[in-house]
Amino acid sequence: MKIHEAEARELLARAGLPVPDADVATTAAGARAIAERLFAAGVPQVVIKAQVLVGGRGKAGGVKLAASAAEAETTAAAILALTIKDLPVRRVLVAPAATIVREIYLAALIDRTTRGVLVMASAAGGMEIEEVAAKDPAAIVREVAHPHGGLLPFQARRLGFGIGLRGELLKQFCLIATGLVKIARESDADLVEVNPLAVVPAPETPGGERLICLDAKVTLDDSALDRHPDLAAWRDADSEDPIDREAREQGISYIRLDGSIGCMVNGAGLAMTTLDLVTRAGGTPANFLDIGGGARADKVAAAMRIILADAGVKAILVNIFGGITRGDEVAKGLIEARAQQDRVVPMVVRIVGTNAAEAAVLLREGGFETATSLDEAAEKAVALAAAGGGK
Amino acid sequence: MKIHEAEARELLARAGLPVPDADVATTAAGARAIAERLFAAGVPQVVIKAQVLVGGRGKAGGVKLAASAAEAETTAAAILALTIKDLPVRRVLVAPAATIVREIYLAALIDRTTRGVLVMASAAGGMEIEEVAAKDPAAIVREVAHPHGGLLPFQARRLGFGIGLRGELLKQFCLIATGLVKIARESDADLVEVNPLAVVPAPETPGGERLICLDAKVTLDDSALDRHPDLAAWRDADSEDPIDREAREQGISYIRLDGSIGCMVNGAGLAMTTLDLVTRAGGTPANFLDIGGGARADKVAAAMRIILADAGVKAILVNIFGGITRGDEVAKGLIEARAQQDRVVPMVVRIVGTNAAEAAVLLREGGFETATSLDEAAEKAVALAAAGGGK
Amino acid sequence: MSILVDQHTRLVVQGLTGREGGFHAGQMAAYGTKIVAGVTPGRGGEFGLDGTVPVFDTVREAVEKTNANTSCIFVPAAGAADAIAEAAASGIKTIFCITEGIPVHDMVGALAVVQQHGARLIGPNCPGATTPGVGGLGAKIGIIPASIHLPGDVGVVSRSGTLTYEAVQSMTDAGIGQSTCLGIGGDPIIGTTFRDALELFAADPATRALVLIGEIGGSAEEEAAAWAGEHLKHLPRVAFIAGRAAPEGRRMGHAGAIVSGASGRAVDKIAALEAAGFKVAGSPTELPRLLIEAGYTKR
Amino acid sequence: MSILVDQHTRLVVQGLTGREGGFHAGQMAAYGTKIVAGVTPGRGGEFGLDGTVPVFDTVREAVEKTNANTSCIFVPAAGAADAIAEAAASGIKTIFCITEGIPVHDMVGALAVVQQHGARLIGPNCPGATTPGVGGLGAKIGIIPASIHLPGDVGVVSRSGTLTYEAVQSMTDAGIGQSTCLGIGGDPIIGTTFRDALELFAADPATRALVLIGEIGGSAEEEAAAWAGEHLKHLPRVAFIAGRAAPEGRRMGHAGAIVSGASGRAVDKIAALEAAGFKVAGSPTELPRLLIEAGYTKR
């Protein structure tokens, strides 16, 4: 689960890491009030940032400076009126505009290859780490945190020295790097990224510098949300499609695509394979949908509702290889769903494995079109969709 | 550093572990006030416990029950008037008297052999673990906590099942065992012992039982007190001998004994050996004293003051094998100390190793009696003490 | 011969008294797997699997009393990582974890405990492994349906569940049997990687060809391909990669893979496998034909 | 020959730029030890030891640039455990930690990292080790005064600092030389135990007799004695235990030792050693005589 910058900042602040003195507003007036407080505290300029869960908000006009409270209000109003990549902006973060001396990249993330919490740092902050990796891989330094101990002090130092820090900045960097790993572990985050981690003038020491976490991105492990009800409450259900929400709540893995053939499959690998074969047969999949292992009739019916909510769906392919999942349960779910649905779409059903014979009886009695092999099912679905005007 | 039961209870309470609703008083009136609060809350009886840093306070009359506020006051007054094993009782803990169904032993401690945090549990609570170990070693179950992860859940369960717990009590036990290790690690404690960990009736569920940490003993790692100023403040300087305090503050390891020969040595092993050889030569050591490595003249002078504060000292043996410690520095310290001291005691000095030659010159000029071998030094010291009426 | 599971397997089922654990233990036993113990904390003293298998409170006790050497975990997600660590710390050397949805940070710690004790973990979130046998000598651990198998000499390793079944079924339908079928699981942190599995198969004299079923994301297929290109020259080998048609950028753990120099894309995985001598199928149904083309001959 | 330190030692001194580190590095170099690097975080790029030895910010860099294989740590107590872990994680296989007063819980974690990397730690709070040499071929690590040594073939291992010097001096005075003198340190958690040290000496063909200097507390002497009784029958061996006259119950970590079945008392240690064929001295000065009585002959 992705959380907004404002909440990511909150996680960092709770861990005692240096973050801007920012606040969130949902109205222009609210933004003005925050700006007024910041200007009163001596901030020369504020930055107003759209809180949306997509990248590229700066280019979309979602991040703007303001030099007065009045300007903050009008700017906030403009940003709150934006829709960025289909997502309406409902909240803005108002923060002091920082004088950035230099930008650093720092992130702690779950890494498949090293099978641990990988901490990456680069002196080339501000840009995407993928860009840095492509241009100059040597500019990225890495440490795998201790599996139980977190980032050990010497590892934090190695990262800091590795990106050229020394003295006071090195010390601060070590605290921040250690803190990010701690946040990742304690919040069950897959990713805690600070970009930029900015070097800014330290007001208290003339000529001195300090580090501040200017922007942060945090992704939480969905599997662990149960034990963090406080963090789970940060889910931005507003910016979630209602269908996506229903899928999530049903424990169904669903990704909407652009095509015409709705797919219902058990298992992510088989679901991807089904998409591949539909594509190979000349069709276009309307979605990825994995009903998971051991799905019962009601879950199958829910999956059908989710698929049919997409008006672009012209045909449906059901592909079930029974293991934990019982074929007859799926067949019952399909019959139940058909009884409830108001839109009739041609369907081809393939059920093999556990209780496939019982399923076959039910499907035959129900008059469903069936298929034996996966390739055959894909071809039939493509033909049905084409007959209905889809592809 | 040992801390009192009251502070150990505080550490457990902070970690969320179940402890009695107790409080500390330094006067009988204060004890009465606490007792009144407890009686008002429905407690049928209170227990008043002397806070002294020695074992066996129960047998010494330092733990008593009281059934009324008035009785609590008189009992507290009596306990506060006690001196237990040379330690005056300055504080009492007033707690609800528990109805104990069964007693369990549980401790987390630094263990030399397994080189980790050893957790020991026994169904035979209430008595000293050494006693259980001697009588029935199989009654003690052990787990070595993960060096970075603390006590893992399955380890806690193994301990709990190992002493015959099940169900709700097992769950509570696991939380407490895990908590003790956490306390040990976070407070840098060498020992966190709960004895008894009592099974008591659970008032909220009829017939139910729950666990409560009725008494706790905690020893903190002296080497780590610097990073726990809050815990270091719990030192009971009152119950510390002024000489012991001076030694500690000077970084001198000093243990007073009963004999007549004061010893000043560098290194614990050599200091023990010096005691052994004094004993073998027929003398009685007045103290163990290790001035540590690299001691300078002023530390040597302080050590001399500490030794001479013991009126039983009839002769002094100085035994220094210079490594980090420089012999001439020690010699200078001895000369300096002699200039300040008001009591003259015969002394034999042996300085070998680093800068022994320079030391020899200084000692000769200062008219000190010297010795070459350790055996010779011990024999001379015993002779000097005997001449002065000591042994 | 086979890998990981055979007639010497003495299995303890962690979570035997649960619905899933009980059901699949029955399936495993029916296939010929020796189930010697169950573990459910608090249920020690009971008997599972129709009263035939003793249940213990701890894995240590199960190992002491029954000489279990392998574990299969059906414990719910919140306790599964701890169950893995318990198995490893109790002397179990081969641990299958079927449970899905384990918090990934829990797995980081559990895997470290497994490695510390010199044990091997398969999974989590994996279907397990089957060594098909003739005449009741088969053994399976996990949830792969028994019906799809045929005894033989082709090793199968896969990240997926049902896709594995699909692939194995197509082989069985074509009369091509399997030495062992292994599902390694698709979670970000898993105990046994494709490369580990290939090393095991390479050391098994009974495995005469290999099938690898991968999918998009991460770089495990590329790493396995690099190793296989050097060490498996003697074995016919085929592969299938799911996700050619999947849209990019919808998977977790992406940054890590990218920075490791891998794209996670199907096209790159296929190229890496082909460069390492794998024939790569466009559909699981093509695997039997490609095996023959790669030089595999049925015995 | 010798154990742990010799002319192949390439030493990095962690804390070289400090007062203690600098002084003792000079002593070590003067004795013939090859000091190839220093490490002080933040002082990378400087040179220590009269400008002859490069200083690095990290041990990893020191190892990469100088092929250091051994480390000696003089870092202050608050950072010493981390310095140990850093050395182990950077490929250093033999780590001496001289620092005293390291919080014991820090050591629990550091020792686990050392073991995980297959490294060996000596100490902390130990004087180090010396392999006396003829004609400038000696090597020493730590703070044992060079002057007390004589090249020879008796291995010495001790928990104490100055008591070790006393024992070695008495041997040197009697014309009995040492193969290696090793101080393992007296802290509750140490990296190399008496038993570990005896195993190392047992594998060293140049060591023809052994001296063990123990003290009261814990059970390390008993454990070493049990091992030596079985494995060291061929070597003359003597011991000294400090603390016969010490009052009981004044030491930390007592409960652990007691529950392990050991009393920590001198009398029991002496009995265990004698049962294992050690001759036990009443004073360090008696060690040379006892060595001869145990069958040791000067070469």
Image (tube, coloured by chain):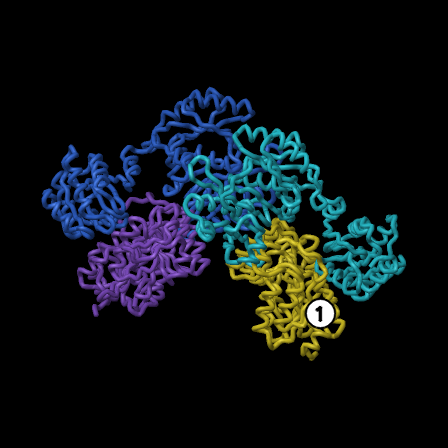
Chain colours: A blue, B cyan, C purple, D yellow
Q: How many marks?
A: 1
| Residue at which label 1 appears | D281
Q: Is A371 situated left or right of A134 in this image?
A: left
Percent position (x, y) of residue D215?
Answer: 67, 62
As helix, strand or loop, the secondary structure at mark 1 comes to strand
Q: Is residue B201 above or below residue C137?
A: above
Q: Position of residue D50 (x, y in %)?
A: 70, 58
The residue lying toward the viewer, choosing from B94 and C83, is B94
Q: Is residue D33 something one can see in this rendering?
A: no
Which quadrant would the C terminus of chain B be assigned to in this image?
A: bottom right
Quadrant for residue A4, please give it: top left
Q: Amino acid at mark 1?
A: Ala
| Residue under the point 52% across and 46% down | B103
- Rendered location of residue A243, percent (x, y): 27, 34
Q: Is residue A388 left or right of residue C145?
A: left
Question: Residue visible at 56% across and 60% down?
Answer: D92
* Front in this rendered view, residue C96 or C189: C96
Could you say which is closer to the camera, residue B57 or residue B254? B57
Q: Is residue A136 left or right of residue B23?
A: left
Q: Is residue B349 above or below residue D133?
A: above
Dot 1 alpha-carbon crowd within 10 angstroms: few under 14, some 14 to 19, many 20 or more: many
Residue D56, picture quadrant = bottom right
Q: Is residue B244 visible?
A: yes
Q: In the image, residue A270 lies at what x, y percent?
A: 25, 50
Question: Label 1 lies in what chain?
Answer: D
Asked which quadrant contains residue A302, the reply is top left
Q: Residue at x 53, y 56 (%)?
A: D112
